[in-house]
Image (cartoon, helix red, strand yellow):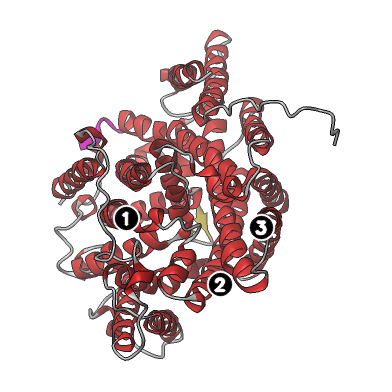
Amino acid sequence: MNDRTEPREQKKMKPIWYFVGLVLLTMGVLVFLTGIFMLVFGVKSTTALASLHPNIWWGAIMAVAGAVFFFKNR
Amino acid sequence: MQAIGLTFIDWLIIAIYFGFVLGIGFYLRSYTKTEDDFFLAGRKNTSWVAGLAFLSANLGALELLGMTGNTYKYGMYVAHFYWIGAVPAMLFLGIYMMPFYYSSRIKSIPGYLKLRFDEKTRVLNGVSFGVMTLLVSGINLYAMALVLHTFLGWNWDVSMWASALTVALYVTLSGLMSAIFTEIIQFFLIWFGLFLVSILGIIDIGGVNEVFSRIPEAFSKLWSTSGDPTQNGMMITWGGIVLGLGFVLSFGYWTTDFLVVQRALSAKDLRSARMTPILASFFKMAVPFIVILGGLIALALARDPGTGFTLLQDGGKINYDSALPMLIARYYPPGLIGLGVTALLAGFMAGQAGNISAFNTVWTYDIYHSVFNKKASPQNLLWMGRAATLAGIVISVGTAYWAKSFPSIMDYMQAIFSWVNAPLFATMLLGMFVKWITPNGAFWGLITGMGSSFTMFLAVKFSWIDPRFITMSSVQSDMAVNFWRAWWAWLICFGVTIAISLFTKKKPDEELVGLVKGLTPKTLGQPVPLLRRPAFWAVLSLIIFLALNIWFW
């Protein structure tokens, strides 16, 4: 430890909502883009209700929720 | 028998989750300087943070899979675990018990027992809680590896060690704070990762009413078939549900289990601490929209051969725990599969972190500091907390390997709670509300209560007695025996504590101020607006609870 160094004032801790936002935004965007990729390139899914493209709209909802948390608590 | 296949994007989402939780552990490390930071997250959380963590510490993946499977098997009766089996106890904790816990500035539940009674009662509870927590933690770890191996085909050892080491790293770095952060992230991941199953299931089947029309009528009722145990899948009467689950097991868990109460103690002030379980009760009542609805959707689909939906089989027997994974496999395309699996992983790991963070606190304060090193400095306690985290993880892994070689240990998990928590609730209730209960009364009452519960368990397990002597009905399920055993253990502890207290020396009143109702003056703070009063939100929660029970009567 360097004794001559003045202790710097510690940065204020980010609130938990910031991290919640970051996780939801990152994962939501990934899910959304996967859905878009499958739609644009005609990748068929064998799951039930695949025609509804749930990864597109659910990924978008998740990303929007994440963005709200993230930008409000930046 | 692998049910779910993963693509590159699914693996990427899982990897991002691991990266996030480790990153949070390192980030919070620089904010974890004192023992209060490590063990109680600095006592600076809002009621929202503490409330969501309070709920999430209990919302493990094992419960999500198990309860969805149980709904497939028993129907709506499983909702009792979320409504009568949780809400009244959570409200009681917030309104009546939290002022004693929080205002006495205790660091753990055994710490309250030390102040109210004496050192030996504290150590007894500290040791039994520590053993229970590590046992449950190891069994959870084993269950996680089993689920990942069964449904995803992952290697048993790799999945167990990877998650155990991740939890060890982030809890060692920043203690309860990182455990709470990951629990809240887990809460959101569970809703975003699993609620879509219910939405897509309802769309698939054609509406909620259509789901209920496709299942047996008794499966959609909560109370109307509880008069006769032969008329419901759980083979239990309303008496067993109300006394065993709704009163003893529920109050025993939600008001005395340090795993959940620790989250409330991390709140920044008394009002936030009281709001913690009350806020959590609203979200607890909502969890059935994932697990109960999911189980009923799985049942409705399985009863229609045209859907092609079936559960997995293990040696000719239906694997009920596969209901949720099979629904994920049915509805989730790439990307969403990764999200669903991440939600389950997050549930397992946050549950593990919750157990370990509660264990390291009880070990450090109620065993190490109380028995081995009474003069330990705050820095020494902080060091010991970190060491206890690592040791707890190692013991959990050992327990998991033990469980692997002895799978029936899983059956004992529910029973463990009735050995420790059910009698403890009698001790706490008497200790907080009756001033003449003595230290010796509490100690011997607790020993007798725990001993009687364990003896009843062995007596039924090895057929020394017929289980109808415990349940007072001609037919019963294992769950019914658990509920009734908890009730008797509570009653025995309650009776013995009172009887011994009548003949032993009580503590002077002045030592009980702030710990017992009647000796604690009411603190009249600033008038608070209606919307900020815990009692207002508790009444609202109670109204919703009653409405749900009447609606599904």
Residue A49 is situated, as x and y percent measured from the top left of the image, at 41, 25
> B22 or B105: nearer the eye?
B105
Q: How far apart are marks 1 and 3 (CA)?
A: 29 Å
Residue under pointer 1: B93
B161 is higher (above) or lower (below) than B294: below
Residue B207 sits inside the magenta stretch: yes
- Which badge, 2 or 1, comes first in the chain's sequence? 1
Query: Is residue B243 visible in the rendered structure shown here?
Result: yes
| Residue to which mark 3 is pinned | B381
Q: How far apart are marks 2 and 1 (CA)?
A: 23 Å
Residue B179 lies, in percent from the top left, at: 56, 44
CB atoms of marks 1 and 3 within 8 Å: no
Q: Do labels 2 and 3 share a chain?
A: yes
In the rendered structure, which disc, 1 or 3, sits on the residue that comes first in sequence? 1
Which stretch is magenta?
Answer: B205-209
The amino acid marked with disc number 1 is Leu
Which residue does the image show at 44% across and 53% down from the upper left?
A: B260
Classify residue B224 by image quadrant. bottom left
Q: What residue type is disc 3 on?
A: Leu
Rendered position, B500 above or below A40 = below
Q: B89 and B417: which one is in front?
A: B89
Please, which chain is the residue tagged with disc 3 on? B
Residue B183 covered by magenta stretch: no
Separation (CA) of disc 2 from disc 3: 18 Å
In the rendered view, does B294 fall on the left or right side of B18?
A: left
Earlier-in-chain disc, 2 versus 3: 2
Which quarter of the picture shows residue B540?
Answer: top left
Q: Name the residue under label 2.
A: B127
